Image (spheres, rainbow, N blue to C red):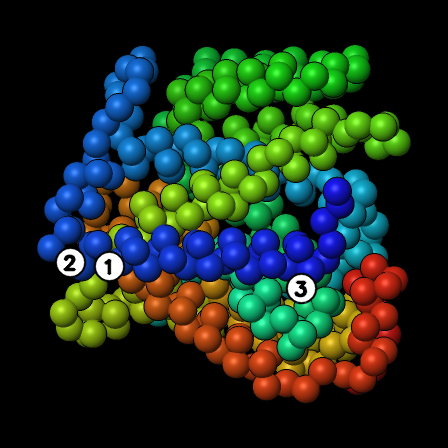
Amino acid sequence: MAKTPQDVAAQEKLAGLVLIGAAALALILANSPMAEAYEKLLKFKFGPEWPRFGVFSVEYWVVDGLMAVFFLLVGLEVKREWFEGRLSSPRERRLPIIAAIGGMAIPALVFVAVTGGDPASINGWAIPAATDIAFAIGVIAILGRYAPASIKLLLVTIAIVDDIGAVIIIALFYTADLNTYALGGALAVMGMMAVMAMYGVRRLLWYIIGFVVLWYLVLASGVHATIAGVMAALTIPLGSGEKKSPLRQLEHDIHPWVMFGIVPIFGFVAAGVALPDNIDALFQPLPLGIMLGLFVGKQIGVYGAIYGAVKMRLATRPRGTRWAQIYGAAMLCGIGFTMSLFIGGLAFPGQPELVDAAKIGTLAGSLLSALAGYAVLRFTPPLPSRSDDLERAGDLFGEDRE
């Protein structure tokens, strides 16, 4: 039975609440007498002994293993949207691409300006460039009728482009010394998977086996293992016009596991940071740069890019929206959470004090962005009935009029 829009909205709202709950539980544990037990849980090792890597800890399995499945889902969604969905034409791609570029560049510049280019923290420049779509859409779902459908579509399309940017950043800037043999093997496996798709292999089992092999080879190559998820997704056939699409089937199958399992588990693992006794710790350059990058940089970058693109007639404003609602959506783009925490862990390997400082800045900036974005959207009156046309037409972009 097909899901109604109300079912989807309820599921998104629940997924957002589960993620918030998991992160809150991690914060509580990390700042309670259970802190030592929480830390031991993360460091607990189990599973097979991998060549070169040994036995993985719980934290390693989540960050390098489960998050590869998260990126697999991201890759599947990006591929589907690019060829059949909201990014399938230059007209539909233009505004979210411009907005996402502004939303990645300005926060990074704010971070560099606040930290003064400090060599000890400069590697964290990409932390505030990320957007957590699960958290942002959870806020939108909680808002209900106060957030028009066009705002949700705008957020989703910006986040899709943002995810592409995050993957590129991770691959280019957060890669260890390369093992060219392993990387060559990974590219060969990806090529074999692409050939399977070209010659009509539609059984998902073969692609899943290929994904697991690809994951290990990418891990061994020095490129972050999660990139294997995107590489695998690019090879899985979309099957446009076919009765059964392998890509759509896999996306449908893993989506609830990712949103209600992997993402909250990562939130539980990544958000547990001991909060400082003195609030002055938040105003140290690293956490302050991240907080202001997310809260100030994102809204300036996203809103400024959209406003400029519309005024220069490079794109049209989303139908049925007020400028204030777009501003609220730009604020919600400052919810970095999952991706910011993830990049923060990559930025400072072997430096737990800097990772914790980055977590504090990420949590503060994300919380401010969520509360401010919610307030703006909640108290901005919607446009009259014409704004509902989007629901029927399924079109993101309309005329630039109030």
Please determine whether, in this image, residue 67 is positioned above or below residue 286: above
Question: Is the residue under label 3 in contact with that under label 2 (CB below 8 Å)?
Answer: no
Q: Amino acid at mark 1?
A: Ile
**Residue at x 53%, y 75% (from the top left corner):** 373
Q: Which quadrant, please, contains the N terminus?
A: top right
Q: Secondary structure at mark 1?
A: helix
Q: Secondary structure at mark 2?
A: loop
Q: Picture quarter containing residue 269? A: top left
N-term-proximal mark, 2 vs 3: 2
Question: Is the residue under label 1 in contact with that under label 2 (CB below 8 Å)?
Answer: yes
**Residue at x 77%, y 70% (from the top left corner):** 318
Q: Which residue is mark 1?
A: 28
**Residue at x 15%, y 51% (from the top left corner):** 35
Neighbours of disc 3 within 10 Å: few (<14), some (14-19), many (20+) = some
Residue closer to the observer: 307 or 325: 325
Asked whether the viewer can see residue 162, the reply is: yes
Which mark is on residue 83?
none
Q: Which residue is mark 3?
A: 152
Residue closer to the observer: 400 or 178: 400
Give the number of callouts. 3
Residue 28 placed where, x, y %?
Answer: 24, 59
Q: Which quadrant, please, contains the C terminus?
A: bottom right
Residue 107 placed where, x, y %?
Answer: 48, 64
Q: Is residue 37 left or right of residue 132?
A: left
N-term-proximal mark, 3 vs 1: 1
Q: Is residue 362 left or right of residue 7?
A: left
Q: Picture quarter containing residue 45? A: top left
Q: CA distance from mark 3 to mark 1?
A: 31 Å
Q: Amino acid at mark 2?
A: Ser
Q: Which residue is mark 2?
A: 32
Q: Secondary structure at mark 3?
A: helix
